[in-house]
């Protein structure tokens, strides 16, 4: 049973769906992990958004620059971890979603600390 419209076809024939029906199939299978990854991404953006709000309230550029740098250290890997999770689920990755997310987060955390 589908959570989408009645014209949605499942891949019960053994053939892989293509186009928009494939997108709906992926979304139906992975809606829980997409939701959790988005929540983790929002948590990763909290230091960035708190720093922006504090710098706007105090009208201080000297507070804005370090808060953007520190917030970007957390926001960048969280966002790229979410992207990586979505791309791996489109490719039907074999590992657990949490281990894939942690791997992408660690990899991008190192990239944000040591650019170049």
Image (tube, grey):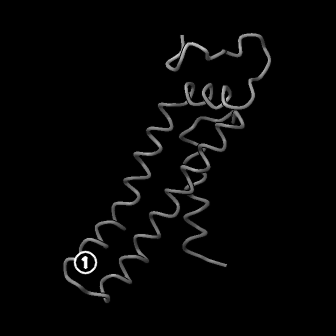
**Rendered-image quadrant of the N terminus:** top right
Q: Position of residue 87 (x, y in %)?
A: 65, 44
Label 1 sits on residue: 56
**Image quadrant assignment for residue 80:** bottom right
**Residue closer to the observer: 106 or 14:** 14
Q: Is residue 21 left or right of residue 50?
A: right
Q: Is residue 99 left or right of residue 13?
A: left
Q: Is residue 72 left or right of residue 91?
A: left
**Residue closer to the observer: 48 or 59:** 59
Most extreme residue toward the left, as rendered? 58
Query: Residue at left 41%, top 57%?
Result: 44
Q: Position of residue 8 (x, y in %)?
A: 61, 17
- On screen, 115 above or below 42? below
Query: Residue at left 65%, top 35%?
Result: 95
The secondary structure type at the circle numbered 1 is helix
**Image quadrant assignment for residue 92:** top right
Q: Position of residue 73 (x, y in %)?
A: 47, 69
Query: Residue at left 57%, top 58%?
Result: 106
**Rendered-image quadrant of the C terminus:** bottom right
**Residue closer to the observer: 6 or 60:** 6
Query: Residue at left 50%, top 35%?
Result: 33
- On screen, 43 above or below 66? above
Q: Is residue 24 left or right of residue 14?
A: left
């Amino acid at each position: 049973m589908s959570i989408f419209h009645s014209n949605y076809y499942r891949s019960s024939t053994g053939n892989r769906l293509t186009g928009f029906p494939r997108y709906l199939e992926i979304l139906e299978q992975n809606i829980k992990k997409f939701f959790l990854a988005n929540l983790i991404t929002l948590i990763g953006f909290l230091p960035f958004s708190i720093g922006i709000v504090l710098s706007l309230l105090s009208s201080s550029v000297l507070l804005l620059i370090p808060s953007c740098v520190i917030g970007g250290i957390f926001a960048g890997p969280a966002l790229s971890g979410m992207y990586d999770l979505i791309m791996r689920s489109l490719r039907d990755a074999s590992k657990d979603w949490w281990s894939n997310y942690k791997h992408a987060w660690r990899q991008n955390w190192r990239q944000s600390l040591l650019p170049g």
